[in-house]
Image (cartoon, rainbow, N blue to C red):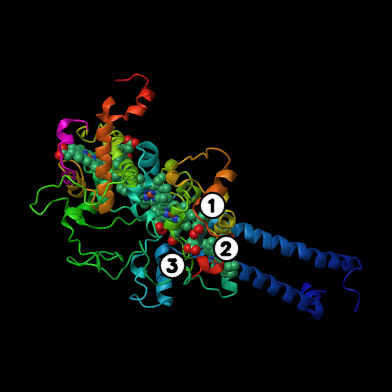
Amino acid sequence: MRLKHIIFGHRLVARALVRAASTLVSTLGLISHCLRLRRSVGRAILPAAAFRRLGCLVGQDAILRPDCQSVQPDPVRPVRLSAAIALLLAALTLTACRQDMHDQPRFIPLRPSGFFEDGRSERPLIEGTVARGHLNDDLALYTGRGPDGKPLDTFPFPVTKDVVARGQERFNVYCSPCHDRTGNGDGMVVRRGYRHPPSYHTDQIRDLANGYIFDVITNGFGAMPDYAAQIPVRDRWAIVAYVRALQLSENASVNDVPAEDRSKLGGAK
Amino acid sequence: MSQIFHRSTNTFARITIFGAVFVLAFVTWAFTELDRSTYNTRATEAREQPVPFSHAHHVGGIGLDCRYCHTTVETSSFANIPPTKTCMNCHSQIWLTSPTLEPVRASFRENKSLDWIRVNDLPDFVYFNHSIHINKGVGCETCHGRVDKMPLTWQENSLQMEWCLNCHRHPEKFVRPREFITTMGYQPAGGQEEIGQRLVHEYNIQDARLLTSCSTCHR
């Protein structure tokens, strides 16, 4: 008796086998469908470009899916056996490798766009745009200058302890890489070859107006880059306040300490 | 027709039926493990970038704060990738002639974006927000690992729902005081459990029931 007859001659056995096989395949297929394997599988098997093109061919037109043109494909991974098997299973149950809900055709921050020439989906504001409530007409606050165009030596808002604390935190983030935490100008970047900034603790810098320091942060000065894009306006003023506090701290005398606290100094003059 | 199968096949069949339960259980287990595996999530796999930017140099070496570059992380849902201008703050003066930095200089000259390859990527049907985590005391390190030791950036955790929920159920195990948000290698000054409980209270962190409700992340 031939093998064929053994298996297919016996209807019950044949039916059981077929059912078992199909159950197994669809279970595996279903599970693999639910797994996020599909994405990595597609990536692993097809060259990245082909994978993208496939998505675009099957998918919507290029205006709806501008990412079709500009998504940066991940580096292609080598074909791996497990990936190949998984693809086979996925193919068996006719599940697609598209991940439409994972990568929806909409713009989110940092996602490139093929629609605009520069590839950015985040559009820069058109020059002269003023958002409601953002007509920055408070000269003192936004330029640090008085009506006469001279740098102010006051602050546009009251300086409280919170403002100085905020200034300290921001100074340590944005200024200390060069000016170091004490304002002496020995920051880590300077030690790696950046131009040495002047110490804050000289009369020349002490005599600078608040508005001038604000302007240095906003527009840069000489070898120092500007920080307008990184630091919001109010934080810049907070930093100015902290620079003032630093200067006071390095140039203080015993007379600045309240009389009742002087004993704590241990006789220092 | 003679008997095709020997009597012993009866036992064999019974064992197979019984065993199928285990086989199925094993297959299910194997697939969930595969699903969690770093092969599937691509965690700990460093990505090639157009410029071999090294957090190890810039954070570990020079000691830059994350916010020097990722400026929006405290105020916005996403953490920005710094514009080329930020790189040029320093690289207009140091490592001027380095050929590795040529793409950065070209990008600045020609006003073209550098095309960084995304590392951490949630599916689009998940809502994630950096600012709430930062402001309620979840440090970068908790989610992104020791970035200051990454020569090329990799994703540290699986970013799977299970992982998010693990913290949303017990935030007190992870939160830290706000002033250490960007600190790498943070050590709690005392018992984490105790500090965590206090901070959960102080920062008004919501109830686990709210934090694990589906509409918090799928909205």
Q: Amino acid at mark 2?
A: Thr
Q: CA distance from mark 3 to mark 2?
A: 35 Å
Residue B151: tell me if it is visible: yes
Look at the image and say whether residue A211 sits in the magenta stretch: yes
Residue A38 is situated, as x and y percent measured from the top left of the image, at 53, 66
Q: CA distance from mark 1 to mark 2?
A: 16 Å
Image mark 3: chain: A
Residue A44: tell me if it is visible: no
Query: Residue B212 — which label?
Result: 2
Badge 3 is on which residue? A51
Question: Residues at badges 3 and 2 in contact (C-beta under 8 Å)?
Answer: no
Q: Amino acid at mark 3?
A: Phe
Circle 3 SS class: helix
Residue B131 is situated, as x and y percent measured from the top left of the image, at 42, 57
- Residue A246 falls in which quadrant of the image? top left
Residue B71 is situated, as x and y percent measured from the top left of the image, at 34, 52
A235 above or below A204? below
